Image: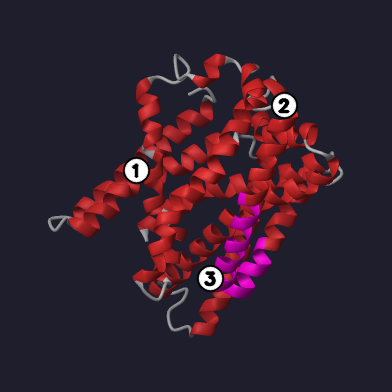
């Protein structure tokens, strides 16, 4: 029950990234014809339809299609934009060299702390959910090998385009930097490609948003409702309806938050990943350390919650913190 509260806290920034990113994409590729609030609403609407209609199965199949779309179109985006800039060598020649070195911008301890972020994957509830719904361990032989390769295919072009964007669209800082990729697509891609490349962004946004929403709903029905008066004595059909209602409620709450949140998408992601990575020792101890106890588990939960809230408050008060 305590972990449910913590996981909701950590997933909210992550969910905001998806909803805000979807709204921003609509606004940019339509030159403001579709405002950000309407774009975010459309993203939430589409995700709510296939998550509530099909549960894990439809979400898994949708994720497969979305991943193929954004991997393919991400590669196309990278090639098109780099060619329009005269090739990779010419493009990087115009980039501030300081951006390519950590220097004073990123001290060694901070750089090291970023290498711990991949540990967050070990605590993502939607990853647990996908693994626990498989028939057997054979299902994961290929995904375990392919996952790091797919991550590299997705992240490398995105990061490189972000770096190139510092010279193509200079002056973007804070929340304004959220739109750097979309501005580059608008400026450097042929008009007929803009819609397709935007579809790649939508696919990336929804492929994370749907699994996370579904995992929260599952946590609520399995770990909260069934153990409290809310869901005691309800049958399976009622439990499914309760889960669907929770999906709609959480999507509605995230949508409303996206209308007032004015934060960098990168910073929101960091707050989310930090919380999950800090919980990683808990799952390692639970699985592999025979001397672990409930008091040890509680100490992890309380420590992570206290530190995360403290640093979040400091960061919210001072954007440069």
- Horizontal and vertical percent position of residue 175: 64, 31
- Residue 276 point in image, percent of width and height: 40, 47
Q: For the image shown, how many numbered marks are present on the structure?
A: 3
x, y percent for residue 125: 43, 58
The residue wearing badge 2 is 85
Q: Where residue 56 is drawn, which disc sits there? A: 3
Is 238 magenta? The answer is no
> Within 10 Å of the Cα at label 3, are there few (<14), some (14-19), or many (20+) other Cα atoms?
many
**Rendered location of residue 313, percent (x, y):** 47, 33
Look at the picture and state if 319 lies above or below 218: above
Q: Which residue is mark 1?
A: 278
Counting residues from the start of the chain, the first of labels 2 and 1 encountered is: 2
Q: Earlier in the sequence, mark 3 or mark 2?
A: 3
Going from N to C along the chain, the mark reached first, 3 or 1, is 3
User: Visible in this render: residue 110?
Assistant: yes
In the visual, does 259 lie left or right of 314?
Answer: right
Q: Residues within 10 Å of mark 1 (few under 14, many from 20)?
A: many
Q: Is residue 59 magenta?
A: yes
Task: Tell me where the magenta segment starts and ends, as one range.
Answer: 47-71
């Amino acid at each position: 029950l305590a972990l449910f509260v913590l996981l909701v806290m950590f997933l909210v920034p992550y969910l905001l990234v998806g909803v805000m990113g979807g709204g921003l994409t609509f606004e940019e590729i339509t030159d403001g014809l579709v405002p950000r609030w309407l774009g975010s609403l459309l993203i939430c609407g589409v995700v709510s339809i296939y998550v509530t209609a099909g549960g894990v199965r439809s979400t898994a199949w949708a994720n497969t299609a979305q991943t193929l779309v954004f991997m393919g179109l991400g590669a196309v985006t990278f090639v098109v934009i780099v060619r329009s800039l005269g090739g990779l060598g010419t493009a990087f020649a115009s980039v501030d060299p300081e951006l390519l070195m950590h220097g004073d911008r990123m001290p060694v301890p901070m750089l090291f702390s970023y290498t711990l972020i991949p540990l967050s994957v070990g605590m993502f509830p939607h990853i647990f959910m996908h693994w626990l719904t498989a028939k057997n361990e054979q299902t994961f032989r290929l995904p375990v090998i392919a996952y790091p390769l797919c991550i590299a295919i997705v992240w490398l072009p995105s990061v490189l385009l972000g770096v190139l964007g510092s010279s193509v669209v200079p002056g973007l800082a804070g929340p304004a930097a959220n739109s750097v990729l979309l501005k580059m697509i608008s400026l450097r891609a042929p008009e007929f490609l803009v819609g397709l490349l935007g579809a790649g962004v939508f696919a990336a946004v929804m492929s994370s948003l749907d699994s996370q929403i579904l995992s929260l709903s599952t946590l609520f029905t399995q770990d909260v409702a069934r153990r409290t008066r809310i869901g005691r004595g309800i049958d399976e059909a009622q439990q499914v309806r309760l889960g669907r209602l929770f999906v709609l409620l959480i999507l509605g709450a995230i949508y409303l938050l996206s209308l007032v949140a004015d934060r960098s998408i990168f910073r929101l992601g960091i707050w989310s990943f930090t919380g999950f990575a800090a919980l990683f020792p808990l799952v390692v101890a639970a699985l592999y350390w025979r001397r672990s106890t409930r008091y040890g588990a509680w100490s992890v939960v309380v420590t992570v919650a206290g530190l995360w809230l403290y640093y979040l408050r400091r960061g919210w008060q001072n954007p440069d913190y």
